[in-house]
Amino acid sequence: MITVVKVSPSHFEVTVSGETTTAHQVTLSDEYHQHLTNGTITPESLIEKSFEFLLARESNTSILRTFDLPLISNHFPEYEKVIMDST
């Protein structure tokens, strides 16, 4: 289960509950949100979809504890296309 809580306009706390529960601090700029979604989904939904993407590829204990959302595409070049195609 993925829970996303907006702490400030660009800062989110994400909790991933599973065999082991993990907490993550994620930043997301309005520009990157618009780039990926064209505003069709909320920032919280984008972050949730991004964590679903990550969890399909690695365990929640392997996901960085603090990161800026665009960092995902550095590790997974297909990330932006997958997200854009799903929104």
Image (cartoon, rainbow, N blue to C red):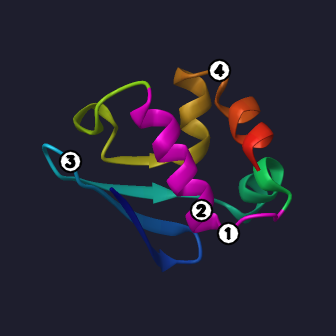
According to the picture, the residue beneath numbered tag 3 turns out to be 18
What residue type is disc 2 on? Ser
Location of mark 1 (residue)? 42
Could you classify mark 4 by the number of other residues whose Cα lies within 10 Å: few (under 14), some (14-19), or many (20 or more)? Answer: few
User: Is 6 or 1 nearer to us in this picture?
Assistant: 1
Going from N to C along the chain, the mark reached first, 4 or 3, is 3
Alpha carbon of mark 2 to alpha carbon of mark 3: how far?
19 Å
Tell me the distance, in whole angstroms, between the alpha carbons under discs 2 and 1: 5 Å
Callout 2–callout 1 Cβ contact below 8 Å: yes
Q: What element carries label 1?
A: loop
Neighbours of disc 1 within 10 Å: few (<14), some (14-19), many (20+): few
In depth, the one of 57 and 70 nearer the eye is 57
Q: Is residue 16 above or below residue 57?
A: below
Where residue 63 appears, x then y in whole percent? 33, 36
Task: Specify which label sits upstream in the sequence, 1 or 3.
Answer: 3
Q: Magenta span covers which residues? A: 39-56
> Which of the two labelled residues, at mark 2 and mark 4, occupies the earlier sequence position?
2
Amino acid, disc 1: Thr
User: Which of the 4 quarters of the picture holds residue 28?
Assistant: bottom right
What is the distance, in whole Å, between disc 1 and disc 3 at their CAs?
24 Å
For the N terminus, the image quarter is: bottom left
Mark number displayed over residue 9: none
From the image, tell me which residue sits under label 4. 77
Q: What element carries label 4?
A: loop
Q: Position of residue 74 (x, y in %)?
A: 58, 25
Name the residue rendered at 67%, 69% in the picture.
42
**Rendering quarter of residue 26:** bottom left
Left or right of 18? Residue 58 is right
Foreground: disc 4 or disc 3: 3
Q: Do the residues labelled 4 and 3 touch (CB within 8 Å)?
A: no
22 to 55, vertically: above or below: below
